[in-house]
Amino acid sequence: MKIAVVGATGLVGTVMLKVLEERNFPLTELIPVASEKSVGKLIKFKGKEYPIVSIDTAISLRPDIAIFSAGGTTSLETAPRFAEVGTTVIDNSSAWRMDPTKKLVVPEVNAHVLTKEDKIIANPNCSTIQMVVALQPLHEKYKIKRVVVSTYQSVTGTGVKAVDQLMNERKGIDGPKAYPYEIDLNVLPHIDVFQDNGYTKEEMKMVKETNKIMGDDSIRVTATTVRIPVMGGHSESVNVEFENDFDLADVRRILEEAPGIIVVDDVANLKYPMPKDAHEKDEVFVGRLRRDESHDKALNMWIVADNLRKGAATNTVQIAEYLIANKLV
């Protein structure tokens, strides 16, 4: 199995390589791909060094799967070129997510939609992924009517420049800025660009992607996305209104039995999910489970995951694992 990693030197790309190694992904040849300025540099994978190649070289090598984390522009330009030579592309950018001809996949939720004909597969937005992993098993049992979510998102979701800004501000260094304001000791209710409706692009991603992944446009979603001075993972306060009433003990059991979820919910002993505990983990952590006392059929929950892993790299690799296991490549 010949695997290309496009954007291998970036923040998510380096985590993708780490996840491939940790999960003992069944590859026979690794093709690391990055921009022209990185071509020829060596990267280490499982104790062996591999030279970084250009996109043109990678396409000529005809990999079985190419996992992309190189931005939307690169993906729009080059993913179809990989697909033309028979490579299955799994793309981490927003480029293909809402394309009606492309599948948007979270393996625990909707991997069953994938076929051999899917040559470009979209990986969802990080904040959407962790939310739908927790929502899907509850939707199957109680049918979700409405979701109200507020996010508390790590600076790692923006990239290296944002991490540098936070660390520089902590040290009192005036350096390059990824954000319009200081991020240390501050929160910014602003992720991605503002749209005409007053919501940000990130907020609208959560609305539209949730409907597409869960395959149900009747689920109403409203989101407020917030950047906070944290590294390690995104957190979400989620209020879910169901069509049918629920038993809290059943909710807990359903989540505990669901794939990819770890329930951390023991408030008597101050146990609840936090980004520092989700850091470098592949699971979605769920806690603070309680009835919404203002509404008969509504639940409050707190969802945390490492945005670079389950929110990006791990989900991409899990899609690739599913393709191989089900002989779709």
Image (cartoon, rainbow, N blue to C red):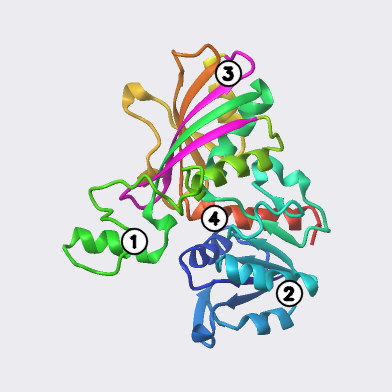
Tell me the chief SS of the magenta region.
strand
Per the model, the C-alpha gap separating discs 1 and 3 is 40 Å
Per the model, the C-alpha gap separating discs 1 and 2 is 33 Å
Using a 10 Å C-alpha cutoff, classify the residue at mark 3 as few (fewer than 14 neighbours), some (14 to 19) or many (20 or more): few
- Which mark lies nearer to you, 3 or 2? 2
Residue tagged 3: 250
Q: Earlier in the sequence, mark 1 or mark 2?
A: 2
Residue 122 image offset from top left, x and y in percent: 66, 56
Residue 251 image offset from top left, x and y in percent: 56, 21
Query: Which residue is pictured at 43% across the width and 50% down the height?
Result: 191
Q: Are the residues flagged by discs 4 and 2 in contact, CB closer than 8 Å? A: no
Q: Earlier in the sequence, mark 3 or mark 2?
A: 2
Q: Say what secondary structure mark 4 lies in.
A: helix
Q: Is residue 304 left or right of residue 314?
A: left
* Amino acid type, callout 4: Ala
- The stretch of residues the image draws in magenta is 219-246
Per the model, the C-alpha gap separating discs 4 and 2 is 23 Å
- Which mark lies nearer to you, 4 or 2? 2
Q: Are the residues flagged by discs 1 and 2 in contact, CB closer than 8 Å? A: no
Residue tagged 4: 312
Q: Earlier in the sequence, mark 3 or mark 4?
A: 3
Residue tagged 1: 163
